[in-house]
């Protein structure tokens, strides 16, 4: 009878893991149209492996036996961010996309106390004519190469502006003195989701590279382009269906084990 309870426990753990994975796939699909969103991917592993016997070595003319072992459950072993590029679409005069997969824009939600990093170049103005990405201040380089907020621009008319391929922002044909600041991480998979489509550094990601203008490792820029989400709807749908089938199978195992236990209890009565 203990085996039936083991089946129920194992199936419940699997269902919990699959339910979390479904939530992540649902989140990906919900963000399909969000510029700069990066897909979350999931992976599973067997847990609490149990070795029933370790097998035997060959002896004379007799062959050995392999170990007898089994897994006792499934868990969500990893949730990672896919930083591959999304498709490019036409934006406004303020929009920017990064041509390579490695580069990231530098933004801050609180005046520079907390620096975050994003691929979303769907830039806009706030009420004070500061350049923003999803409501966060966008940072650039000044004439001395210092990282500074792109702030206090001459007007709020988007059509008056143009990004050049060297990353400098022009207003009515004259440079504003701001060049977009880009950086990258040696291990972007170690970044943590922070706010919107922005990420923050962790011990795993390491420190960002020194901010530079476009080119080299950070990549070239594409003026008037916006990088869309890299969510692949068909793949998300297929993964979701497979997880739902796995959940259904585990629910059937729970029902089967429960029926056996109930039958045994009724016989005892």
Image: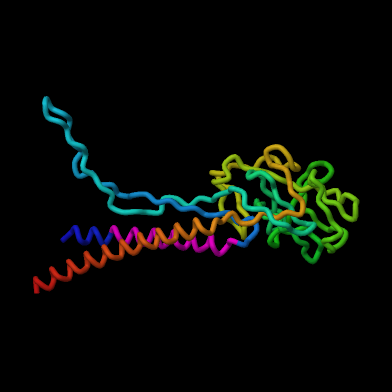
* Above/below status of 16 relative to 69: below
The residue drawn where x is 62% and y is 60% is 196
* Above/below status of 173 relative to 260: above
Which residue occupies the foreground of this view, 243 or 126?
Answer: 243
The residue drawn where x is 59% and y is 39% is 186
Which residue occupies the foreground of this view, 152 or 238?
Answer: 238
Query: Majority secondary structure of the magenta segment?
Result: helix
Query: Which image quarter: residue 146?
Result: top right
The residue drawn where x is 82% and y is 41% is 144
Left of 190 or right of it: where is 115? right
- Give percent across and percent down for residue 226: 70, 55
Residue lying furthest left: 268
Is-magenta flag for residue 17?
Answer: yes
Which residue occupies the foreground of this view, 196 or 207?
Answer: 196
Residue lying furthest front: 234
Bounds of the magenta span? 10-32
Is-magenta flag for residue 257?
Answer: no
């Amino acid at each position: 009878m203990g085996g039936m309870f083991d089946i129920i426990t194992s199936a419940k753990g699997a269902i919990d893991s699959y339910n979390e994975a479904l939530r992540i796939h649902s989140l990906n699909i919900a963000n399909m149209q969000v510029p700069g969103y990066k897909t979350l991917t999931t992976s599973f592993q067997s847990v609490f492996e149990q070795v029933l016997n370790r097998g035997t070595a060959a002896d004379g003319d007799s062959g050995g036996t392999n170990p007898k072992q089994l897994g006792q459950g499934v868990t969500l072993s990893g949730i990672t961010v896919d930083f591959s590029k999304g498709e490019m679409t036409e934006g406004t005069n303020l929009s920017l996309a990064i041509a390579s997969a490695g580069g990231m824009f530098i933004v801050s939600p609180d005046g520079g106390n907390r620096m975050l990093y994003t691929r979303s170049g769907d830039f806009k103005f706030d009420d004070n004519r500061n350049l923003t990405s999803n409501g966060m201040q966008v940072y650039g380089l000044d004439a001395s190469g210092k990282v500074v907020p792109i702030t206090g621009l001459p007007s709020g008319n988007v059509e008056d502006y143009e990004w050049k391929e060297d990353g400098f922002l022009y207003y009515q044909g004259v440079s504003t003195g701001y060049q977009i600041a880009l950086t990258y991480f040696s291990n972007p998979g170690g970044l943590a989701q922070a706010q919107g489509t922005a990420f923050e550094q962790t011990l795993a990601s390491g420190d960002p590279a020194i901010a530079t203008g476009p080119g080299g490792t950070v990549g070239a820029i594409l003026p008037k382009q916006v990088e869309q989400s890299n969510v692949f709807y068909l793949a998300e749908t297929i993964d979701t269906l497979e997880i739902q089938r796995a959940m259904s199978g585990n629910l059937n195992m729970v029902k089967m084990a429960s029926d056996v236990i109930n039958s045994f209890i009724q016989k005892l009565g």
